[in-house]
Amino acid sequence: MPSSPPEVSLADAARWYDGKSFRDDWTSWHFPNWLRLLAPFRGRPAAMLEIGSWEGRSALFFLNYLPQMRLTCIDTFAGGQEHRDAAAADAREAELLQALESRFDTNVAAFSGRIDKVKAPSAEALIGLGLDDRRFDLAYIDGGHRAREVYADCALTWPLMVRGGLVIIDDYQWAEMPDPMDNPKPGVDAFLRSVEGQYRMVLDDYQLAIEKR
Ligand SMILES: C[S@@+](CC[C@H](N)C(=O)[O-])C[C@H]1O[C@@H](n2cnc3c(N)ncnc32)[C@H](O)[C@@H]1O
């Protein structure tokens, strides 16, 4: 009989980051939800897709918490629009972006055997995965924040998901940009309308999580 991995506390998860190098933490406050949502996937092999990896913080959570999971990480490592705007205005931000990919590589080095890194714009990468008939049990969508980008990431991810697969969408309620179309929500809402009846909502908060029927 397959045995489940030992339970994980928030204190355990915090230790996964010891000795690693990060500037940002947009991620840890989601861990209580992720511990709960991802628990059913812990004791079995799974394929997971991550769109938007940055310094590797979310990837490290998924790789540690799901010991039999293989992770495909899609990122240009060039930052989103807001990071590129910041880099154009501030030399320290530009330096951070310059070093982003090597920081990701170093942070996740212990898991390199379970990671497929795809350095490309997400639409291009997702089309490639579709053409290769790849399928995923789990997806985390945390790439570009503009409505059209999030819509494209969701719409191109959906056909890759198996039935019962779980898609977590970050930043649903992020509303930092004055033009609503520069925020994720209109893109996510349009995507959800396009797949009505095909999913079950399992988390409706700052992040959304939907299970494919
Ligand atoms: C918010 S960060 C991801 C944070 C990460 N998931 C975490 O929790 O630490 C967004 C990432 O998406 C990437 N990104 C933005 N637009 C993209 C696009 N169109 N294609 C691929 N990657 C993109 C950026 O380079 C950046 O690393």
Image: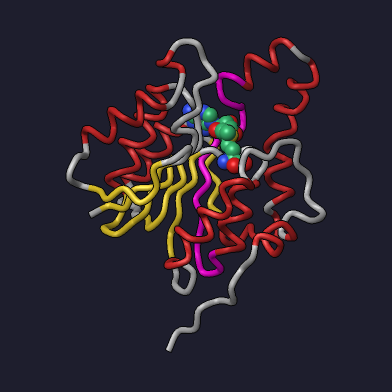
Relative placement, left or right, of 97 versus 162 is right
Residue occupying the point 64% across, 60% down: 111
Q: Residue at x 48, y 60 (%)?
A: 36
Q: Is residue 38 above or below residue 194?
A: below
Along the line of sight, the residue nearer the viewer: 131 or 157: 157
* Residue 53 can be seen, yes or no: no
Q: Residue furthest left?
A: 197
Viewer-proximal residue, 205 or 158?
205
Image point 37% across, 55% down: which residue? 136
Q: Which residue lies furthest to the bottom in this view?
A: 1
Q: Is residue 18 left or right of residue 182?
A: right
Between residue 204 and residue 138, name the one nearer to us: 204
Report the side of 138 relative to 25 (left or right).
left
Position of residue 155 measured from the top left corner of the image (x, y, whole percent)? 30, 35
Q: Quadrant of the C terminus?
A: bottom left
Q: In this view, does 91 lie above or below 39?
A: above
Residue 191 lies within the magenta run: no
Where are the magenta residues, as a range?
A: 66-82
